[in-house]
Image (cartoon, grey):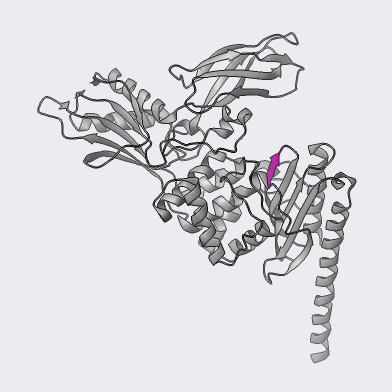
Amino acid sequence: MKNICTLIFMLALHLAGTAQNAYQKAVDGLAGSPAFRHGALSVCVIDVESGKVLASHEPNRSVAPASNLKLLSTASALALLGPDYRFRTELQADGQPDGNGYLSGNLYIRGYGDPTLGSPLMEGAMGFGPLLERMCLAVQQQGIRRIQGQVIGDASLFGSQACIRTWQWEDLGNYYAAGAWSLNIHENMHYLHFQQRSQLGDRPAIVGIEPEVPGLAFTNELRSAARGSGDNAYIFGAPYQFDRYVRGAIPVGEGRFTIKGALPNPPLLAAQYLLQSLSGLGIGAEGAAAVFNDAPSSGRRVLYTHYSPPLSGIVSRTNMESVNLYCEAMVKTIGMEQKGEGSTEAGLEALQNYWEGQGLDWAGCSIADGSGLSEANMVASSFLAQLLYLMARQEERLFHPFYESLPEAGRSGSLKNVLRGTAAEGRLRAKSGTLERVRAYSGYATARNGRLLAFSIIANNYEGGGGAMRQKLEQLMLELCRN
């Protein structure tokens, strides 16, 4: 019996060594591609049970991670805020109404960072319309019939700097670079509708914007491109700028074509819409809607408190749909909760302190935001693989929602159509990352013997098209599941 046990043990070691060699062989094959003659590839694969590195290629080389950086933000939010954390938003008032329903003060919507407030896309979030109805009802229940002051969007908790300084100009007017205030609304984005044209080169007409944004104006320089060419339209404009340009192209066709842009001032829009809704009920205000980015909040009464869906659900949509706004809001909220300062810098400092305490080596990292949109971000694949390893060693209430939030090969998110029908389907979960000349995947693979692998594969400045590079990275992920 002893000899049989020894034989089984030796066979297991042999099989483990064979699989490990197969992983390294696959990594070496990718690294040897001519596409990396002038580019960079960083790969790290870790066995979660043992913590051993099974395969690597320049794992400590600093490279741009693109949206793979969202793994750091979402893991940190779960660890530091908790999966049951709910963002709150308060409707506040100065003073009490008199016997005639006259409020001798202001009405405030005070934000605490909720990125899902009034969202049309987040499951479980109250839509913009119903949210306004609920706030109006709260005002009516207080007996307020007239407001001496103004309706104010209070975004003071995070200040006025909503976007990151190193985000590119061509991104700022588009929904994915909307930025994060402490008072966000409708995911800080609008829909811009065009009527397609049938002739190449013709200018599609703007036929609507949703929601309507007072004062927002567009100079339309869009052109019609080949049928099926997709959305290649960009909106140019920065936060607080209401004059914007639309450039690029959309396909020829006969119907409507919709793109998404960034709201120039979400806190102001929230106040404007609440004032409009109250006016529709006969509750007027003497002043115009306004926004405070640096306002004291003492001495106010809370009329209504709104709560977001649980953080676990927000993390799920963040990683499944790669939502930049949610990550930026999470990082600023971590800064507020941990450091008393609602800024990106304070949030990044807090999460670095936490993960270094967990044993994560921060050497070689340069992190500018929470979403990965900034090209100033630099991390190594060993950093992300180690983060994933440490997250897998956390208690189940933290790891489970994190793991489930990652797109699943052949089934969900950005991997829904990736590696379908292969050994990776249902056994691979990963976050994709894409920027100009950047392709990346980081996540978990279940090997053929059932062991869980944490991995990160990041390619920068490669030669050839992005689609071809993506297929090379997908082939490596498949090998992790095959062996």
Q: Examine the rendering and report whether any part of residue 143 can be seen.
A: yes
103 relative to 59, above or below: above
Magenta stretch, residue numbers: 432-436
Q: Position of residue 147 (x, y in %)?
A: 21, 24
Residue visible at 86% across and 44% down?
35
- Quadrant showing the N terminus: bottom right
Q: Position of residue 50 (x, y in %)?
A: 69, 72
* Front one among 103 and 417: 103
Q: Report if residue 230 lies within the magenta region.
A: no
Side of 87 relative to 449 (left or right): left
Q: How many marks?
A: 0
Side of 78 relative to 278 (left or right): right
Side of 386 relative to 402 (left or right): right
Q: Position of residue 91 (x, y in %)?
A: 30, 36
Residue visible at 80% across and 38% down?
467
Q: Position of residue 83 (x, y in %)?
A: 47, 54
Q: Examine the rendering and report whether any part of residue 1 can be seen.
A: no
Residue visible at 83% across and 71% down?
17
129 relative to 182, above or below: above
* Front one among 164 and 189: 164
- Quadrant showing the C terminus: bottom right
Q: Residue furthest left?
A: 99
* Front one among 46 and 125: 46
Image quarter for residue 184?
top left
Image quarter for residue 140?
top left
Q: Report if residue 433 lies within the magenta region.
A: yes
Residue visible at 88% across and 54% down?
29
* Front one among 204 and 348: 348
Q: Main secondary structure of the magenta part?
A: strand
